[in-house]
């Protein structure tokens, strides 16, 4: 094997010698390295000692600053506390009418300026305090403050305003009254038990949009109508189909068809194109050929079409 070494080229033999030298160097470094470690540890230990001493000086400075800060702001807090106490002692309690006194008087009673401003805004919009409890609902008046003010609240008798007069003139309810949904105005509709101003306006709006009611069941479609209200109102309603305004399906434009709540633009366009291709439509059954129309839509829209 040793003889084989001389069969390598000069460059290969040199590479082998260098490799052997590196291996020996690594072994020597690994052997000698521990002799240098203690010096490094000692240096590291010195550094940590210095760092700890520096940290202690920082803690001392922070403690000094904190003590100075506490002393300064404790003085400010005490002064502020005295000021708040002094301000609290300024207000006084006396009898007042929340519907008549001005903002300065509210402040004298110990209320914040923004609360006084809220009260005046409420009054400027026509609001009135009719009971001491209604005054307690003002934003910013806490229960403790209201309890303090309540014995001093005196509310004079409030005269009836124009707004109150309108409320008093609300049509009285009439038992067993029957109204026709396609002709009754809001005043007549409001005479029905369970039918208020909101529902009355919704009924008028619905018949203007659709052309009229074709059955009482359509009351269920009104916004806000629930089953309880429907059961109260429906027995007092009737329908006159002759008053329903119908759409001439053979001449109506896409826009006219689309104006009806039961039809969207694509359905209206499909009806118009179908009529243009086929010619005059004679009955509702022909609409079944239009794929865009669902059977439910045809059922609902049928009473509003005139095929003449």
Image (cartoon, helix red, strand yellow):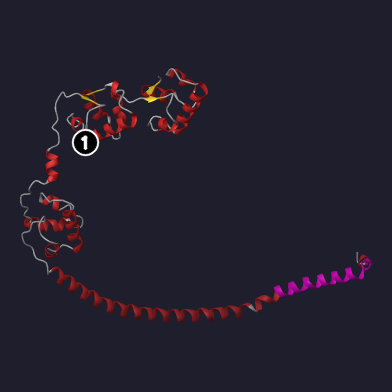
The residue under the point 49% across, 21% down is: 279
- Magenta-tinted stretch: 6-30
Density class for disc 1 (Cα within 10 Å; few <14, some 14-19, many ≥20) is some
Q: Secondary structure at mark 1?
A: helix
The residue under the point 31% across, 78% down is: 69
Can residue 111 be seen in the rendering of this structure?
Answer: yes
Q: Is residue 17 magenta?
A: yes
Nearest the viewer among 106 and 208 is: 208
Q: Is residue 174 left or right of residue 247?
A: left
Tag 1 residue = 197
Q: Is residue 197 magenta?
A: no
Nearest the viewer among 257 and 11 is: 257
| Residue 76 in the image, given as x and y percentages of width and height | 24, 76
Query: Quadrant of the rendered structure where residue 104 is?
Result: bottom left
Can residue 141 be seen in the rendering of this structure?
Answer: no
| Residue 78 in the image, given as x and y percentages of width and height | 21, 75
Q: How many marks?
A: 1
Q: Quadrant of the C terminus?
A: top left
Overall secondary structure of the magenta section: helix
The residue under the point 38% across, 78% down is: 62
Is 235 drawn above or below residue 77 in the view shown?
above
Query: Quadrant of the rendered structure where residue 24 is?
Result: bottom right
Q: Is residue 97 left or right of residue 73?
A: left
């Amino acid at each position: 094997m040793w003889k084989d070494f001389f069969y390598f080229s000069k460059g290969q033999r040199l590479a082998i010698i260098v490799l052997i030298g590196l291996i020996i160097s690594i072994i020597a470094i690994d052997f000698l390295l521990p002799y240098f470690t203690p010096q490094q540890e000692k240096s590291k230990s010195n550094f940590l000692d210095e760092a700890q001493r520096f940290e202690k000086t920082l803690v001392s400075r922070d403690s000094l600053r904190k003590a100075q800060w506490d002393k300064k702001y404790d003085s400010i807090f005490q002064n502020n506390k005295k000021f708040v106490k002094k301000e609290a002692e300024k207000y006084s309690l006396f009898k007042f009418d929340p519907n008549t006194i001005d903002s300065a008087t509210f402040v004298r009673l110990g209320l914040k300026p923004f609360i006084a401003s809220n009260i005046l805004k409420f009054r400027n919009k026509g609001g009135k305090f009719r009971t001491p409890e209604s005054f307690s609902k003002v934003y910013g008046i806490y229960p403790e403050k209201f309890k303090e003010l309540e014995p001093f609240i005196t509310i004079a008798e409030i005269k009836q305003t124009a707004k109150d007069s309108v409320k008093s003139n609300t049509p009285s309810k009439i038992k067993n009254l029957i109204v026709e949904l396609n002709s009754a105005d809001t005043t007549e509709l409001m005479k029905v038990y369970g039918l208020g101003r909101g529902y009355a306006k919704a009924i008028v709006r619905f018949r203007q949009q659709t052309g009229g009611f074709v059955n009482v069941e359509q009351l269920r479609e009104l916004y806000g109508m629930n089953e309880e209200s429907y059961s109260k109102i429906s027995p007092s309603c009737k329908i006159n189909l002759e008053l329903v305004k119908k759409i001439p399906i053979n001449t109506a434009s896409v826009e006219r068809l689309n104006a009806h709540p039961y039809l969207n633009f694509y359905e209206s366009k499909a009806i118009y194109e179908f009529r243009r291709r086929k010619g005059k439509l004679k009955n509702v059954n022909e609409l079944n050929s239009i794929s865009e129309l669902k059977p439910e839509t045809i059922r609902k829209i049928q009473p509003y079409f005139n095929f003449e």
